Image (cartoon, rainbow, N blue to C red):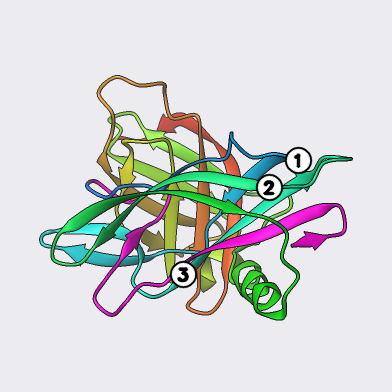
């Protein structure tokens, strides 16, 4: 679906009761969605954008993802003189009693029907509101790499009921502990898993939710001056 100079679409996952799928940073055991748009034609820089996740239990492990039907928003730029064709190679995890990796080859062309437009609108309306600058936010990884300390505007962290950290593959984070005393609000986020050998954790995305709305702070630099636990 075209929106000015932007193409918008949605990948809908119609989860039945009891089924679930994962967010981009799914936790210690989940399978993050993997999608390859390289076979597409007539479009540039396609991106998949996720709504805020929820937490759910898988035995003794907590994972991050979705337990109800969900739409992943897709945004791209059209290339002049070419008919856009979106092709996607997709791998996702679908779980009930067991998890099943599902691999699909998808193809879509522009569709301006009312049903498609409504589905795309729902997907984009469900996305976190992106912070324009991230100013006032700070992230520090403790020297023992056991927790990520997030400092931010008290008003935002005071409203937050949960905070999710999106980081490179193999990093996993637990639920935050909020400290709202004093002039600077702080969230201590435990590190549940860290890769033994991988590039250092330089930047993270944060998603804060208050039960109704969510906010995205993108590409927040991570310092290394945090205290040990």
Where in the figure is residue 36, as x and y percent of width and height?
51, 38
> Of 107 and 201, which appears nearest the observer?
107
| Segment tinted magenta in the rendering | 1-28
Relative horizontal placement of residue 105, taking residue 137 as reference (left or right): left
Other residues around mark 3 within 10 Å, as few (<14) / some (14–19) / many (≥20): many
Relative horizontal placement of residue 1, taking residue 73 as reference (left or right): right
Instruction: Name the secondary structure under disc 2.
Output: loop
| Residue drawn at 65 percent across, 60 percent down | 9
* CA gap, disc 2 and disc 3: 23 Å
Residue beneath disc 1: 42
Residue beneath disc 3: 70
Q: Earlier in the sequence, mark 2 or mark 3?
A: 3
Query: 184 above or below 76?
Result: below
Instruction: Name the secondary structure under disc 1.
Output: loop
Task: Please say whether residue 178 is visible from this viewpoint.
Answer: yes
The numbered dot on residue 85 is 2
| Residue drawn at 39 percent across, 62 percent down | 178
């Amino acid at each position: 679906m075209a929106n000015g100079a932007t193409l918008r679409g949605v990948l809908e996952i119609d989860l039945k009761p009891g089924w679930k799928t994962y967010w981009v940073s799914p936790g210690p055991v989940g399978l993050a969605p993997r999608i390859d748009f390289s076979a597409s034609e007539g479009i540039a820089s396609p991106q998949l954008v996720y709504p805020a996740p929820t937490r759910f239990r898988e035995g003794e492990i907590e994972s991050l993802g979705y337990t109800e039907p969900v739409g992943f928003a897709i945004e791209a730029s059209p290339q002049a003189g070419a008919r856009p064709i979106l092709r996607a190679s997709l791998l996702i995890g679908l779980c009930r009693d067991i998890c099943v990796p599902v691999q699909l080859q998808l193809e879509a062309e522009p569709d301006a029907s009312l049903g498609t437009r409504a589905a795309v609108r729902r997907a984009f309306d469900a996305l976190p509101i992106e912070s324009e600058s991230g100013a006032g936010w700070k992230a520090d990884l403790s020297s023992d790499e056991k927790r990520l300390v997030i400092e931010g505007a008290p008003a935002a962290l005071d409203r937050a009921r949960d905070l999710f950290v999106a980081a490179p593959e193999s990093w996993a984070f637990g639920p935050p502990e909020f400290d709202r005393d004093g002039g600077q609000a702080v969230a201590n986020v435990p590190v549940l898993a860290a890769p033994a050998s991988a590039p250092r954790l330089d930047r993270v995305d944060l998603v804060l939710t208050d039960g109704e709305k969510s906010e995205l702070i993108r590409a927040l630099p991570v310092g290394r001056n945090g205290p040990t636990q």
